[in-house]
Image (cartoon, helix red, strand yellow):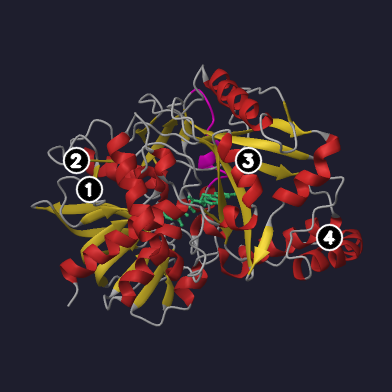
Amino acid sequence: MLITSLANCADQSVLEFDVCVVGAGAAGIYSAVRLANLGLNVGVVDAGPTETVAPDAVGYIAEFGDQFYNGAVDGRAFGFGGTTSRWGGVLIPHSNHDVRGNDEPCWKHISETVAREKRAVLVGLGAKNHDDFDRYPARLLPDVTGELSEVGIDMMASLFLPFRTKNLSTLARKCKANLSVYTDATASDWKIVDENVTSLRLRTLTRLEHEVRARWFILAAGTLESARSLLEIQAKYPGLLQSEILGRGLGDHLSTAVASVDVSDGKRCLDLFAPRFERGWMRSFRFLDRNQNHQTRAFAHFVFDNRNAGFALAKKVLTSLQARRVPKLRIAEIVTGLAGVSGLAYSRYVRNRLHIPQSTDMKLQLDVEQPFDPSNRIVLSNATDGYGRRRLIINWKIGDHAATQIDRIADEFVRRWNRSKLPKLTRASVSLSGQKPHDAFHPVGACRLGPSEEYPVGFDLSVNTVRNLSVLCTGVLPTAGSANPTFSMLCLGEVLCRRIGTLIGN
Ligand SMILES: Cc1cc2nc3c(=O)[nH]c(=O)nc-3n(C[C@H](O)[C@H](O)[C@H](O)COP(=O)(O)OP(=O)(O)OC[C@H]3O[C@@H](n4cnc5c(N)ncnc54)[C@H](O)[C@@H]3O)c2cc1C
């Protein structure tokens, strides 16, 4: 892999690739590495620098409608690795729990694709023996899964990428195939002739310009920026991409604590549900209500308010390393933290558990998808940014009925749970004060995939009516569903890469 910053590269040569991938986040890196390993000459261009920064540091400033959408600011990082420089690295598939009455054909397609491709993606991420998302809980806790199943609650296990590989730039750095990464390069001015993208321009904050030509383009710029590029194409070529729903339906998970564990049951609950390690990988548990009467998809999980100083120190050091920054630590923090690190190490390497002291407060967190709302919408402003592009306006809000909806799902879930013999849950009140209650940062919906030209993106991720342009971002998902979105997006990407490999490979 070669990495080049275009920030000060005055040589205005034309870059030519088999495939140009726009965006070096999870989607861009995963697909670029896959395609390069298939023997294609792949170039990845990213607006940010080699070490990631906040969007405004590279001139990406959005305007907001009635409510502020924090996902556009704290929920994104720009540069090599994209948002994986800060994410939790939790991998979990969408599944047949997502196939409900609304959006049924889309979710059927997504859940079947994920079921088929999950193993291939795990191999790509170096986790080939961990595709037991639904079987792991039954293997480890057969009595608990049996109890919950009787009351209509299914259990799944998520998989955490280890800290050393969470930032997916490591995947690209290890790639020995024909892969070039260009940073400080904003893709703009898409040129389309006869329904084919022929080139685009790369602009730098230093006002330099380069041209890229490729046989295929993948737009992997994250949900908000991918939608923005498609809206730019729609505005420039009115005959193309006539989908009315492009940019509409921006949604996320609304994530909030809905119940606590009775103090008397705390130890038992911790013993059962604290995250565990298996063959070096951390696993934690998810709970899904099997009740298909709820059209709204959701998942529940326990969160632990871990105040252990060793845990805090380890987390700070590891998240800095994930972002490729030197951790900034105070002496007192190091001294108190080191004392707690031994407990952490004992628990991790002897008990294969994440160390959580017994006094730790445990809450049941519910992540509920926002239903499709066409007025939650991304549009282009008339004001332009430092690259000469029209800025983004993000019209996003939490619906009026969100709190009632969350309460309804939480009531039902807790009622079912408490019918089992497991530690009892006590309902806590939910208050949504106009902001996202807890930041899940799972933007979806603005570039929805679907079975017809009504949708901007087809089931095969091609942009409708543009032959050699595909989109890979969580925005292709209709709603946030019952899982964190990145793993399912990569499963869709796996099929895309094989298709491109077949169409233009040698
Ligand atoms: C704190 C946090 C924790 C999270 N935890 C999880 C988790 O545990 N599990 C999970 O599934 N999801 C999680 N997420 C969400 C997850 O990080 C995203 O779904 C995922 O990283 C999106 O990847 P992406 O490649 O689509 O977009 P991004 O990572 O945003 O990458 C897009 C890239 O495109 C570049 N770009 C944008 N516009 C242009 C342009 N015009 N030209 C060139 N480049 C451009 C940007 O610089 C950026 O690097 C978390 C998010 C956050 C913020």
Marks 2 and 3 sit apart, C-alpha to C-alpha, by 50 Å
Reading the image, the residue beneath label 4 is 310
Q: Is residue 40 magenta?
A: no
Q: Name the N-terminal-most of marks 1 and 3.
A: 3
On screen, residue 139 above or below 39: above
C-beta proximity under 8 Å, tags 1 and 3: no
Q: What residue do we see at 39% from left, 25% from top?
A: 373
The circle on residue 238 is none
Q: Secondary structure at mark 2?
A: loop
Reading the image, the residue beneath label 1 is 463
C-beta proximity under 8 Å, tags 1 and 2: yes
Q: Which numbered mark, 2 or 4, is in the foreground of this view?
A: 4
Q: Secondary structure at mark 3?
A: helix
Marks 1 and 3 sit apart, C-alpha to C-alpha, by 46 Å
Reading the image, the residue beneath label 2 is 241
| Location of residue 213 in the rendering, given as x and y in whole percent from the top left corner | 22, 66
